[in-house]
Image: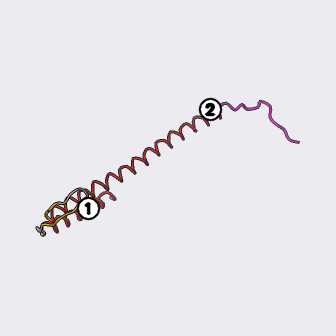
Amino acid sequence: MKYLLIFLLVLVIFVISVTLGAHNDQVVTFNYLLAQGQYRVSTLLATLFAAGFVLGWAICGLFWLRTRVALANSQRKLKRLQQQFEQADSSVTVSPTPVVKE
């Protein structure tokens, strides 16, 4: 359900961007680091939106991947500690004579 709402939000933003861009056929000058170009507002808006969308997903994907790797490492350490605990527990010997307190 959460992913559906996120998808719908992105879809609404994209539709609004396309609608606004379709009504703006004006040519603007866009200065970027290496050069300068003249683009239609609709093309510039769609391109920058797509670039931001891809960049956002890439950053979120890297954080998700880092979290998954940390989780896998923690699970591996937990399994190793459980095995060590089971080995230590099985190596403990029980005294055959009961201890009596007076």
The residue most toward the right is: 102
Give me the residue at 27% from left, 63% from top.
9
Q: Is 27 situated above or below 69?
A: below
Residue 22: mark in rendering: none
Q: Is 55 situated above or below 13?
A: above
Mark 1 — residue?
A: 8
Q: Position of residue 88 (x, y in %)?
A: 65, 34
Give me the residue at 23% from left, 57% from top.
50
- Around disc 2, counting alpha carbons within 10 Å, would you say few (fewer than 14), some (14 to 19), or many (20 or more)? few
Looking at the image, tell me whether mark 2 or mark 1 is earlier in sequence order: 1
Give me the residue at 32% from left, 51% from top.
58
Quarter holding the N terminus is bottom left
Of the pair 27 and 61, the residue shown nearer to us = 27
Of the pair 81 and 40, the residue shown nearer to us = 40
Q: Which residues lie in the magenta part? A: 85-102
Q: Position of residue 33 (x, y in %)?
A: 26, 58
Of the pair 101 and 9, the residue shown nearer to us = 9
- Around disc 1, counting alpha carbons within 10 Å, would you say few (fewer than 14), some (14 to 19), or many (20 or more)? few
Residue 83 on the magenta segment: no
Q: Quadrant of residue 31?
A: bottom left
